[in-house]
Image (spheres, rainbow, N blue to C red):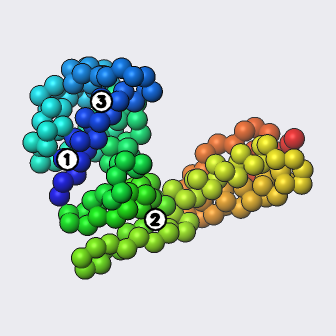
């Protein structure tokens, strides 16, 4: 599988396009220094080998720290969304890059099949539930009445479904705490 090689290519791209939106390029040494400050010393040689495709594997902890050092999301190193049409997600199995992102973030499930893979929408998966929760919370906070009340009812239902599936929803603003059955309804 070429995951390490692909992560290395993306590392090189982001390093040369500085993830903070500036035109400044980062040297391998600067990325190594940032990784060390983040708690995982990855030396210049290790990062250079990764960029040149001379590493057999890359650990998840390395991807997370490198992404933080580059100021990009980890998924950006794992899948080249917007720059690559397809991404290899399993040895010899490639899917559209958007589908790879959906699988990595938990909004699609993977069903390996013969010479490829089939992805299915993951209705009610944790990634989808948390995204639905965020969007509904935003509506519950900003929509005018009666849409706001509908969104708050939907939010209470989503939180119940999350708990039924063993998930812990994120805390609500104090004035919406009643949606979890605590306190009085608020503005």
Secondary structure found at label 1: helix
Residue 153 position within the rendered picture, expressed as x and y whole percent measured from the top left: 79, 58
Label tally = 3
Q: Which residue is mark 1?
A: 4
Residue 15's label in the rendered image is 3
Q: Which residue is mark 2?
A: 108
Classed neighbour count for the residue bearing mark 2: other residues with Cα under 10 Å, few (<14), some (14–19), many (≥20): many
Mark 3 touching mark 2, by CB under 8 A? no
Secondary structure found at label 3: helix
Residue in the picture at 37% in, 47% down:
83
In this view, the residue in front, 40 or 186, is 40
Of label 1 and label 2, which has the lower sequence position? 1
Residue 106: name its quadrant. Answer: bottom left
CA distance separating discs 1 and 3: 16 Å
Quarter of the picture containing the C terminus is: top right
Residue in the picture at 83% in, 51% down:
148
Q: Is residue 107 left or right of residue 162?
A: left
Secondary structure found at label 2: strand
């Amino acid at each position: 599988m070429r995951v390490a090689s692909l992560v290395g290519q993306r590392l090189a791209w982001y390093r040369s396009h500085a993830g903070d939106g500036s035109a400044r390029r980062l040297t391998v040494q600067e990325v190594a220094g940032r990784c060390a400050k983040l708690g995982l010393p990855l030396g210049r040689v290790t990062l250079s080998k990764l960029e040149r495709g001379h590493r057999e594997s890359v650990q998840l902890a390395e991807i997370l720290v490198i992404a933080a050092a580059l100021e990009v999301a980890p998924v950006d190193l794992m899948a080249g969304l917007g720059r690559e049409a397809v991404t290899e997600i399993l040895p010899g199995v490639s899917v559209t890059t958007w589908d790879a992102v959906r699988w990595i973030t938990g909004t699609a499930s993977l069903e390996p099949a013969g010479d490829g893979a089939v992805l299915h929408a993951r209705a009610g998966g944790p990634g989808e539930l948390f995204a639905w929760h965020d969007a509904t919370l935003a509506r519950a906070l900003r929509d005018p009445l009666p849409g706001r009340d509908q969104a708050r009812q939907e939010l209470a239902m989503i939180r119940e479904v999350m708990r039924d599936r063993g998930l812990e929803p994120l805390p609500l603003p104090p004035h919406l705490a009643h949606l979890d059955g605590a306190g009085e309804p608020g503005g």
